[in-house]
Image (cartoon, helix red, strand yellow):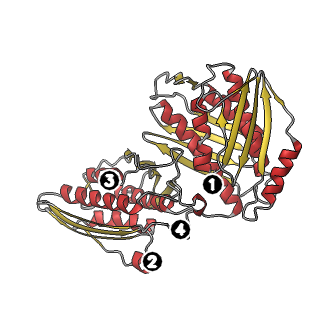
Amino acid sequence: ATLRLAPCAPRRRDAGRRRARTRATSPWAVGRAERACGDVQGVAVIDANGARGTIATGAPFLDHMIDQLTAHAQLGVHCVLTRRGVTCEEARDAGGVSDEEAFRCAGAALGAALRETLGDGRGAGERAKARFAAPLDEAYATCGIELYGERGLETFALAPYGKPGTAGRASIGTYPTALTETFWRALAEEAGVSVRLVKERGDNAHHIVESTFKAFARGVRAAMDAAEGIDVYAGAAASEETRRSAIQRSTKETSIDVKLDLDASRDDVEGSKISTGIVALDGLFTAIQREAGVALNIAATGDLWIDDHHTAEDVSIAVGQALNKALGTKKGCNRMGSAMSTEGEATVECVMDLSNRPYLGYGLELESDKVGDLSVEMVEHMFMSLTFNGQMTVHLVEHARGADEAEVATAAAKAFGKCLRQCAAIDPRRAGSVASSKGTLSV
C-alpha cells in the first residue's frame, strides 16, 4: 500500500497557525495533518505548547510509545486512526486489522504534522540538529536528528529485538516489532527530517523500542532548543524544592560525613572539600563535583590498614544516598542526559536517567591492579554504589583508551558529573511536573 494525501481542513490549520503566532515565546506552529494508507485514515496534531490529546491507533503499545513525545519532547500530541471505517479508541486493541497500513499511516500523519510545527527552518537549519542517547535499564538507544535535513530515515538499527546473536522478539504483546521501522520511515519522510536511530545496548524488546522513542523525543526537543538558542542545561531556573542533603554513616569499618547542595552558590561549589584518605578516590569525586557544578563535602575515615574496599564502598553509598535525597521528587528536572568527556587521550560517554530504576551498564575495561592508590575493581564499585543508591540508570561507554587507566577512570567521572548536571537542571517549561509518561517516578 502506498500513502495518498488526504486534504486537511484549511480553517482548522490556519486557526492553529494564528494561535501559534500569538505565543510570543515560541516560534513553532500548531501542526495538523491527515493521511490515508489503504483502508486506514489518520489525523494528527502537534502543538509545541499544548497538552496531550487523544492517542488511539488501535495498537496500545504504539499509543504508549507515541505518548513519549508528550513526556520527553514536551509536545502536545493528538493522533487518531480509523481502520476500515471504525475509529480507534485509547487502550483498545484493533485486533491486528490493517496493522501495516496503520503503522505507516500513524507515522505519516505525525510526520506531516511535525513538518507543519517546525515550519521552513529559515535561519535555523544549520543549528537545528542534535544527538541524544536515552536509556531504559539495560538498553539504550541513540538518535541523531537534523530537523531540516530532508533525507528521511538514514539509519535504522534496532534488531534483534532481544539479545544480540538471537532472532529477537517478533512481537511485544500484540505489537509487531518489524513494523517499528515502518512507522519511523513514514514519520521521517513526511517530517522532512534526517534521522539515525541505533540500539547501542539492549536485551529486552520492550526496553529497546521504548528507549528509541525516548531518544527520538529528546533529540527532537534538543534540536528545537538548538534552533532557538536555548540551553536547558544552563541551570538558571530554580527548583521548587530545596535540593540539599546531609548523610552521616558510621560503622566499625568507616565514619563518613557527606553534605551535598545541588543549587549551591559559586563560592560554595568552589569551596567543596573532599577527603577520604584515598588520593585517587578524592580525585574521582572531585571530578564529578566540579563537572556537576554542585557543592560536595566529604569527610571520611576508614580501615585503610586492611584495604581500600570498605572506605571506597561506604563513601560511594553515602554520596549516592545524598544525591537521591537532594533530588527529592525530581519535579521539573530534565531527568535524562548524555555527555562525553576526555582526560588526556581517553574519551568516555555517560548516559544517565534519574529514573528510580537502578542499573549500571559498565563499559570501562580496566585491567591493571591499581588506579593510583585505588584498587582497580573499586572504580566499578564506586560507580555501582553511586548509581544504585542514587536510584538512577547509568551507562558508561569507553570510546577511546587513554595513556593509562587513570585517564579512563577520570574521563568517566567527568562524564558522570557533566551528565548529572544535565539531568538535575530544572527546565521551567515542565512547570514542576515529572518527566514521565507515568506522571511520577516515585512508584
User: Which numbered disc flags the more N-terminal residue, 1 or 3?
Assistant: 1
**Residue in front for this viewpoint, 115 or 430:** 430
- Asked which secondary structure carries label 2, the reply is loop
Q: Judge left or right: residue 406 versus residue 400.
A: left
- Asked which secondary structure carries label 1, the reply is helix
Other residues around mark 2 within 10 Å, as few (<14) / some (14–19) / many (≥20): few
User: Which numbered disc flags the more N-terminal residue, 1 or 4?
Assistant: 1
User: Which numbered disc flags the more N-terminal residue, 3 or 2?
Assistant: 2
State the separation of the CA atoms marked 1 and 3.
29 Å
The residue that label 4 is drawn on is 235
State the separation of the CA atoms marked 2 and 4.
12 Å
Residue type at numbered disc 3: Asn
The answer to whether the residue labelled 3 contacts the one labelled 2, judged by CB atoms less than 8 Å apart, is no
| Mark drawn on residue 338 | none
Other residues around mark 3 within 10 Å, as few (<14) / some (14–19) / many (≥20): many
Percent position of residue 295, x then y: 39, 72
The residue that label 1 is drawn on is 222
The answer to whether the residue labelled 1 contacts the one labelled 4, judged by CB atoms less than 8 Å apart, is no
**Residue in front for this viewpoint, 54 or 167:** 54
- The residue shown at (38%, 63%) is 326
User: Which numbered disc flags the more N-terminal residue, 2 or 4?
Assistant: 4
Residue type at numbered disc 4: Gly
State the separation of the CA atoms marked 1 and 4.
15 Å
The answer to whether the residue labelled 4 contacts the one labelled 3, judged by CB atoms less than 8 Å apart, is no
- Asked which secondary structure carries label 4, the reply is loop
Total numbered badges shown on the rendered structure: 4
User: Which numbered disc flags the more N-terminal residue, 2 or 1?
Assistant: 1
The answer to whether the residue labelled 2 contacts the one labelled 1, judged by CB atoms less than 8 Å apart, is no
**Residue in front for this viewpoint, 85 or 274:** 85
| Mark drawn on residue 265 | 2
State the separation of the CA atoms marked 4 and 3.
24 Å
| Mark drawn on residue 389 | 3
